[in-house]
Amino acid sequence: MPDLGKVVVGVVKWYDTSKGYGFVIADDGGGDILLHANILRAHGYATAVEGSAVTLETQTTDRGRQAVSILSMEKPAAADIPTQNREPRPTELVAAADVDTPLQPARVKWFDKVKGFGFVNVFGDPSDVFVHMEVLRCSAIGDLAPGEAVAVRIIEGPRGHMAAEVCVWERAIGENQARGGTIA
């Protein structure tokens, strides 16, 4: 019989958005825990950043342990994020906390993780909104897929519209409903 609902604390070992899964190293020494994209999305996350502290409910099956619920996930401090292949932060980026614009619904036009940037389009507006990889990192998102629904806070950058924050669509809806509002 599977062991269901055990609470485990650990650290994200790796997560690959293209594969749709990754693994968590458990603090209890009981082996790696499978973390599937469906569990992330069900709890308002698009990805799991390597090194993030996570508290999960797990189940044990004949194939090993897997996450069934995310109780909390905290991304690592910027100093703890691996810097390999990391571009320097552009000077025009600002902290999302400093931006007082509403979240706007958008769809990912394209995003290239290797290049470190991409574009989204706000619903009803054909103009492109620039998204830098560093903004995704600060938003605890590892990658974006073409056509994916997101919510963005937009600022005017030196070359036009750019995202100051990107949220997973489901999380943005939940946060706005909790505040009694809607997405702009």
Image (tube, rainbow, N blue to C red):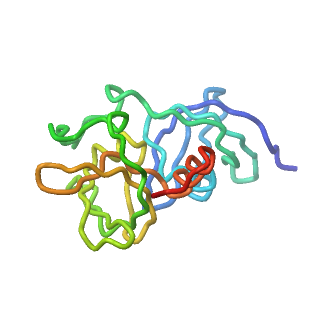
Q: Residue at x 61, y 32 (%)?
A: 26
Quadrant where the image shows the C terminus: bottom left
Query: Which image quarter: residue 173?
Result: bottom right
Image mark count: 0
Q: Name the foreground residue: 66 vs 158.
A: 158
Residue 139 image offset from top left, x and y in percent: 40, 43
Q: Residue at x 40, y 71 (%)?
A: 147
Query: Which image quarter: residue 49?
Result: top left
Residue 12 image offset from top left, x and y in percent: 50, 38
Residue extending farthest left? 158
* Left or right side of 149 for 54: right
* Left or right side of 160 for 142: right
Residue 164 image offset from top left, x and y in percent: 31, 46
Whether residue 106 is situated above or below residue 139 in the rendered picture: below
Whether residue 34 is situated above or below residue 119 in the rendered picture: above
Residue extending farthest right? 1
Q: Residue at x 50, y 58 (%)?
A: 169
Residue 59 image offset from top left, x and y in percent: 75, 46
Q: Name the foreground residue: 16 vs 87.
A: 87
* Left or right side of 30 for 95: left
Q: Name the foreground residue: 67 vs 175.
A: 175
